[in-house]
Amino acid sequence: MQQTKTTLQQNKMAAVPIQRLMLSMGLPMILSMVLQAFYNIVDSYFVGNMPDSSGEIALNALTLAFPIQMLMIAIGVGTGVGVNSLLSRSLGAGERERASKIAGNSIVLGVCTYIVFLLIGLFGVRPYFSTQTSDATVLQIGTEYLTICCTLSFGAIVFMIYEKLLQATGRTVLSMIAQIAGAAVNIVLDPIMIFGLLGCPQMGVAGAAYATVIGQIVSLILGVIFHCALNHDIDAHSRYFKPELAIIRDIYKIGVPAIIMQALMSVQTYAVNIIFGPVGNAAITAYGVYYKVQQFVFFAMFGMNNAMIPIVGFNFGARNKKRVRDGIKFGMLYTLGIAIVGMAVLQIAAIAFAPLFALTESTTALFVSAVRVITLGYIFAGANITYQGAFQAFGRGVSSLAVSLMRLIVFALPAAYWLTLASNAENVIWWAFPLAELLSAVIGVIMLKRIYRREVAPLTAY
């Protein structure tokens, strides 16, 4: 029975038409990630409308806290990307024993990552905030919120590992259910814990943090259950939890560039907060709110990317050139479709989003300007995300990192700094981001063509 289930799963990854397989695996990932973006928006909505404090002050504190949360996600997701790519290629090559060891070692790595963020939560949060603000209120609110999120981050970090284990074997619906359940718990608990409803004490920003970590723990519990009970392609015996340096090295050969790539988003946000400082707190807050709104689109594109990686990786391991080529082709087409739809929706709905966060008139104007300009680069961002996913599927983590480094740091930050020197900086600073995506896309397509000739062209065309 076990072998039959494994064979069926292998047939799915190796035989189902790529166009349909990409949709069947991608749509659950997109839905779960878009829902995650939605509850990030819900957090900001409730925090921004707290009755006993200025909404913009609270939002400013959460904006400054966001880079550390993104760093947490970066390490968890980056490790997961290494696991996803290595595991899918091992399954494609029929190496079940190795796949099981990869899964066990990845869970150990998730626990070790949590210990690091526990220490950050206990000792590093206040010094971190002190580098960005001298406002006592912002410092107090932000420190309280981020301390809770870091010290109780085991739900978020370890779940990201189990999520990738389910995705790598094609069980994206199960990972979606776990993600949705956690998001739903977060959304329900937010108003209850922030405002003190249904007999719960009023906790303000701390309530938002507790609602978030409780939702993450719910997702983790379901992820563990689904993996142990239903993920039949991987053996979950305790002996596979023994660390093996060779496997850890192979995971991080892809994972470290992916971690750095994800962490660059945190570095970019932190740097932008500092670069935009001379322009004013309104610009920082506007950028922070925009960043959460744009997650709807970027999370959807990364969801499709997460479906492409195991499909391309599995068939690359099976040396099937046609399916590798089709995987990249449809991954690109679907991702660009998401980018175009996302750009159109945000262009139309930019003004409608602003009232949700109780922004002042001047901050609202900056937010709308940011949306109008930055979304013009989404089609190039979609191409860049597809390049990154293809490189990860081939085990070319450094190439994936290079594209991310260009779009988030090398081109974006110097352009942002230069534009802050303009006399009308508040209106032109946003052009740094689409410009960076365009330049990175040009270089990315050149890199993909070169790697394709080396890695895919020699494969069997069947």
Image: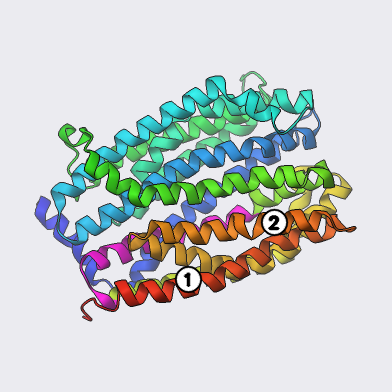
**269 sits left or right of 133 in the view:** left
Residue at image location 64% in from the left, 23% down from the top: 126
Q: Which residues are magenta?
A: 294-322
Q: Is residue 309 magenta?
A: yes
Check residue 334 in the rendering and tell me which mark sits there, or answer none.
1
Inter-mark Cα distance, 1 to 2: 31 Å
Q: Which residue is mark 2?
A: 414
Vertical relation: 296 (above or below) 378: above
Vertical relation: 246 (above or below) 327: above
Residue 345 visible in the displayed image: no
Describe the element under mark 2 as helix, strand or loop.
Answer: helix
* Residue 165 location (% of width, % of height): 31, 47
Residue at image location 80% in from the left, 48% down from the top: 283
Question: Circle 2: is it few (<14), some (14-19), or many (20+) Cα within 10 Å?
Answer: few
Residue at image location 55% in from the left, 29% down from the top: 149
Vertical relation: 245 (above or below) 34: above
* Residue 325 location (% of width, % of height): 34, 76
Q: Nearer the viewer, residue 3 or 65?
A: 65
Residue type (three-letter) at the residue carrying disc 2:
Pro
Residue type (three-letter) at the residue carrying disc 1:
Tyr
Q: Earlier in the sequence, mark 1 or mark 2?
A: 1
Residue at image location 20% in from the left, 33% down from the top: 242
Question: Circle 1: is it few (<14), some (14-19), or many (20+) Cα within 10 Å?
Answer: some
- Magenta segment's dominant SS is helix
Residue 67 visible in the displayed image: yes
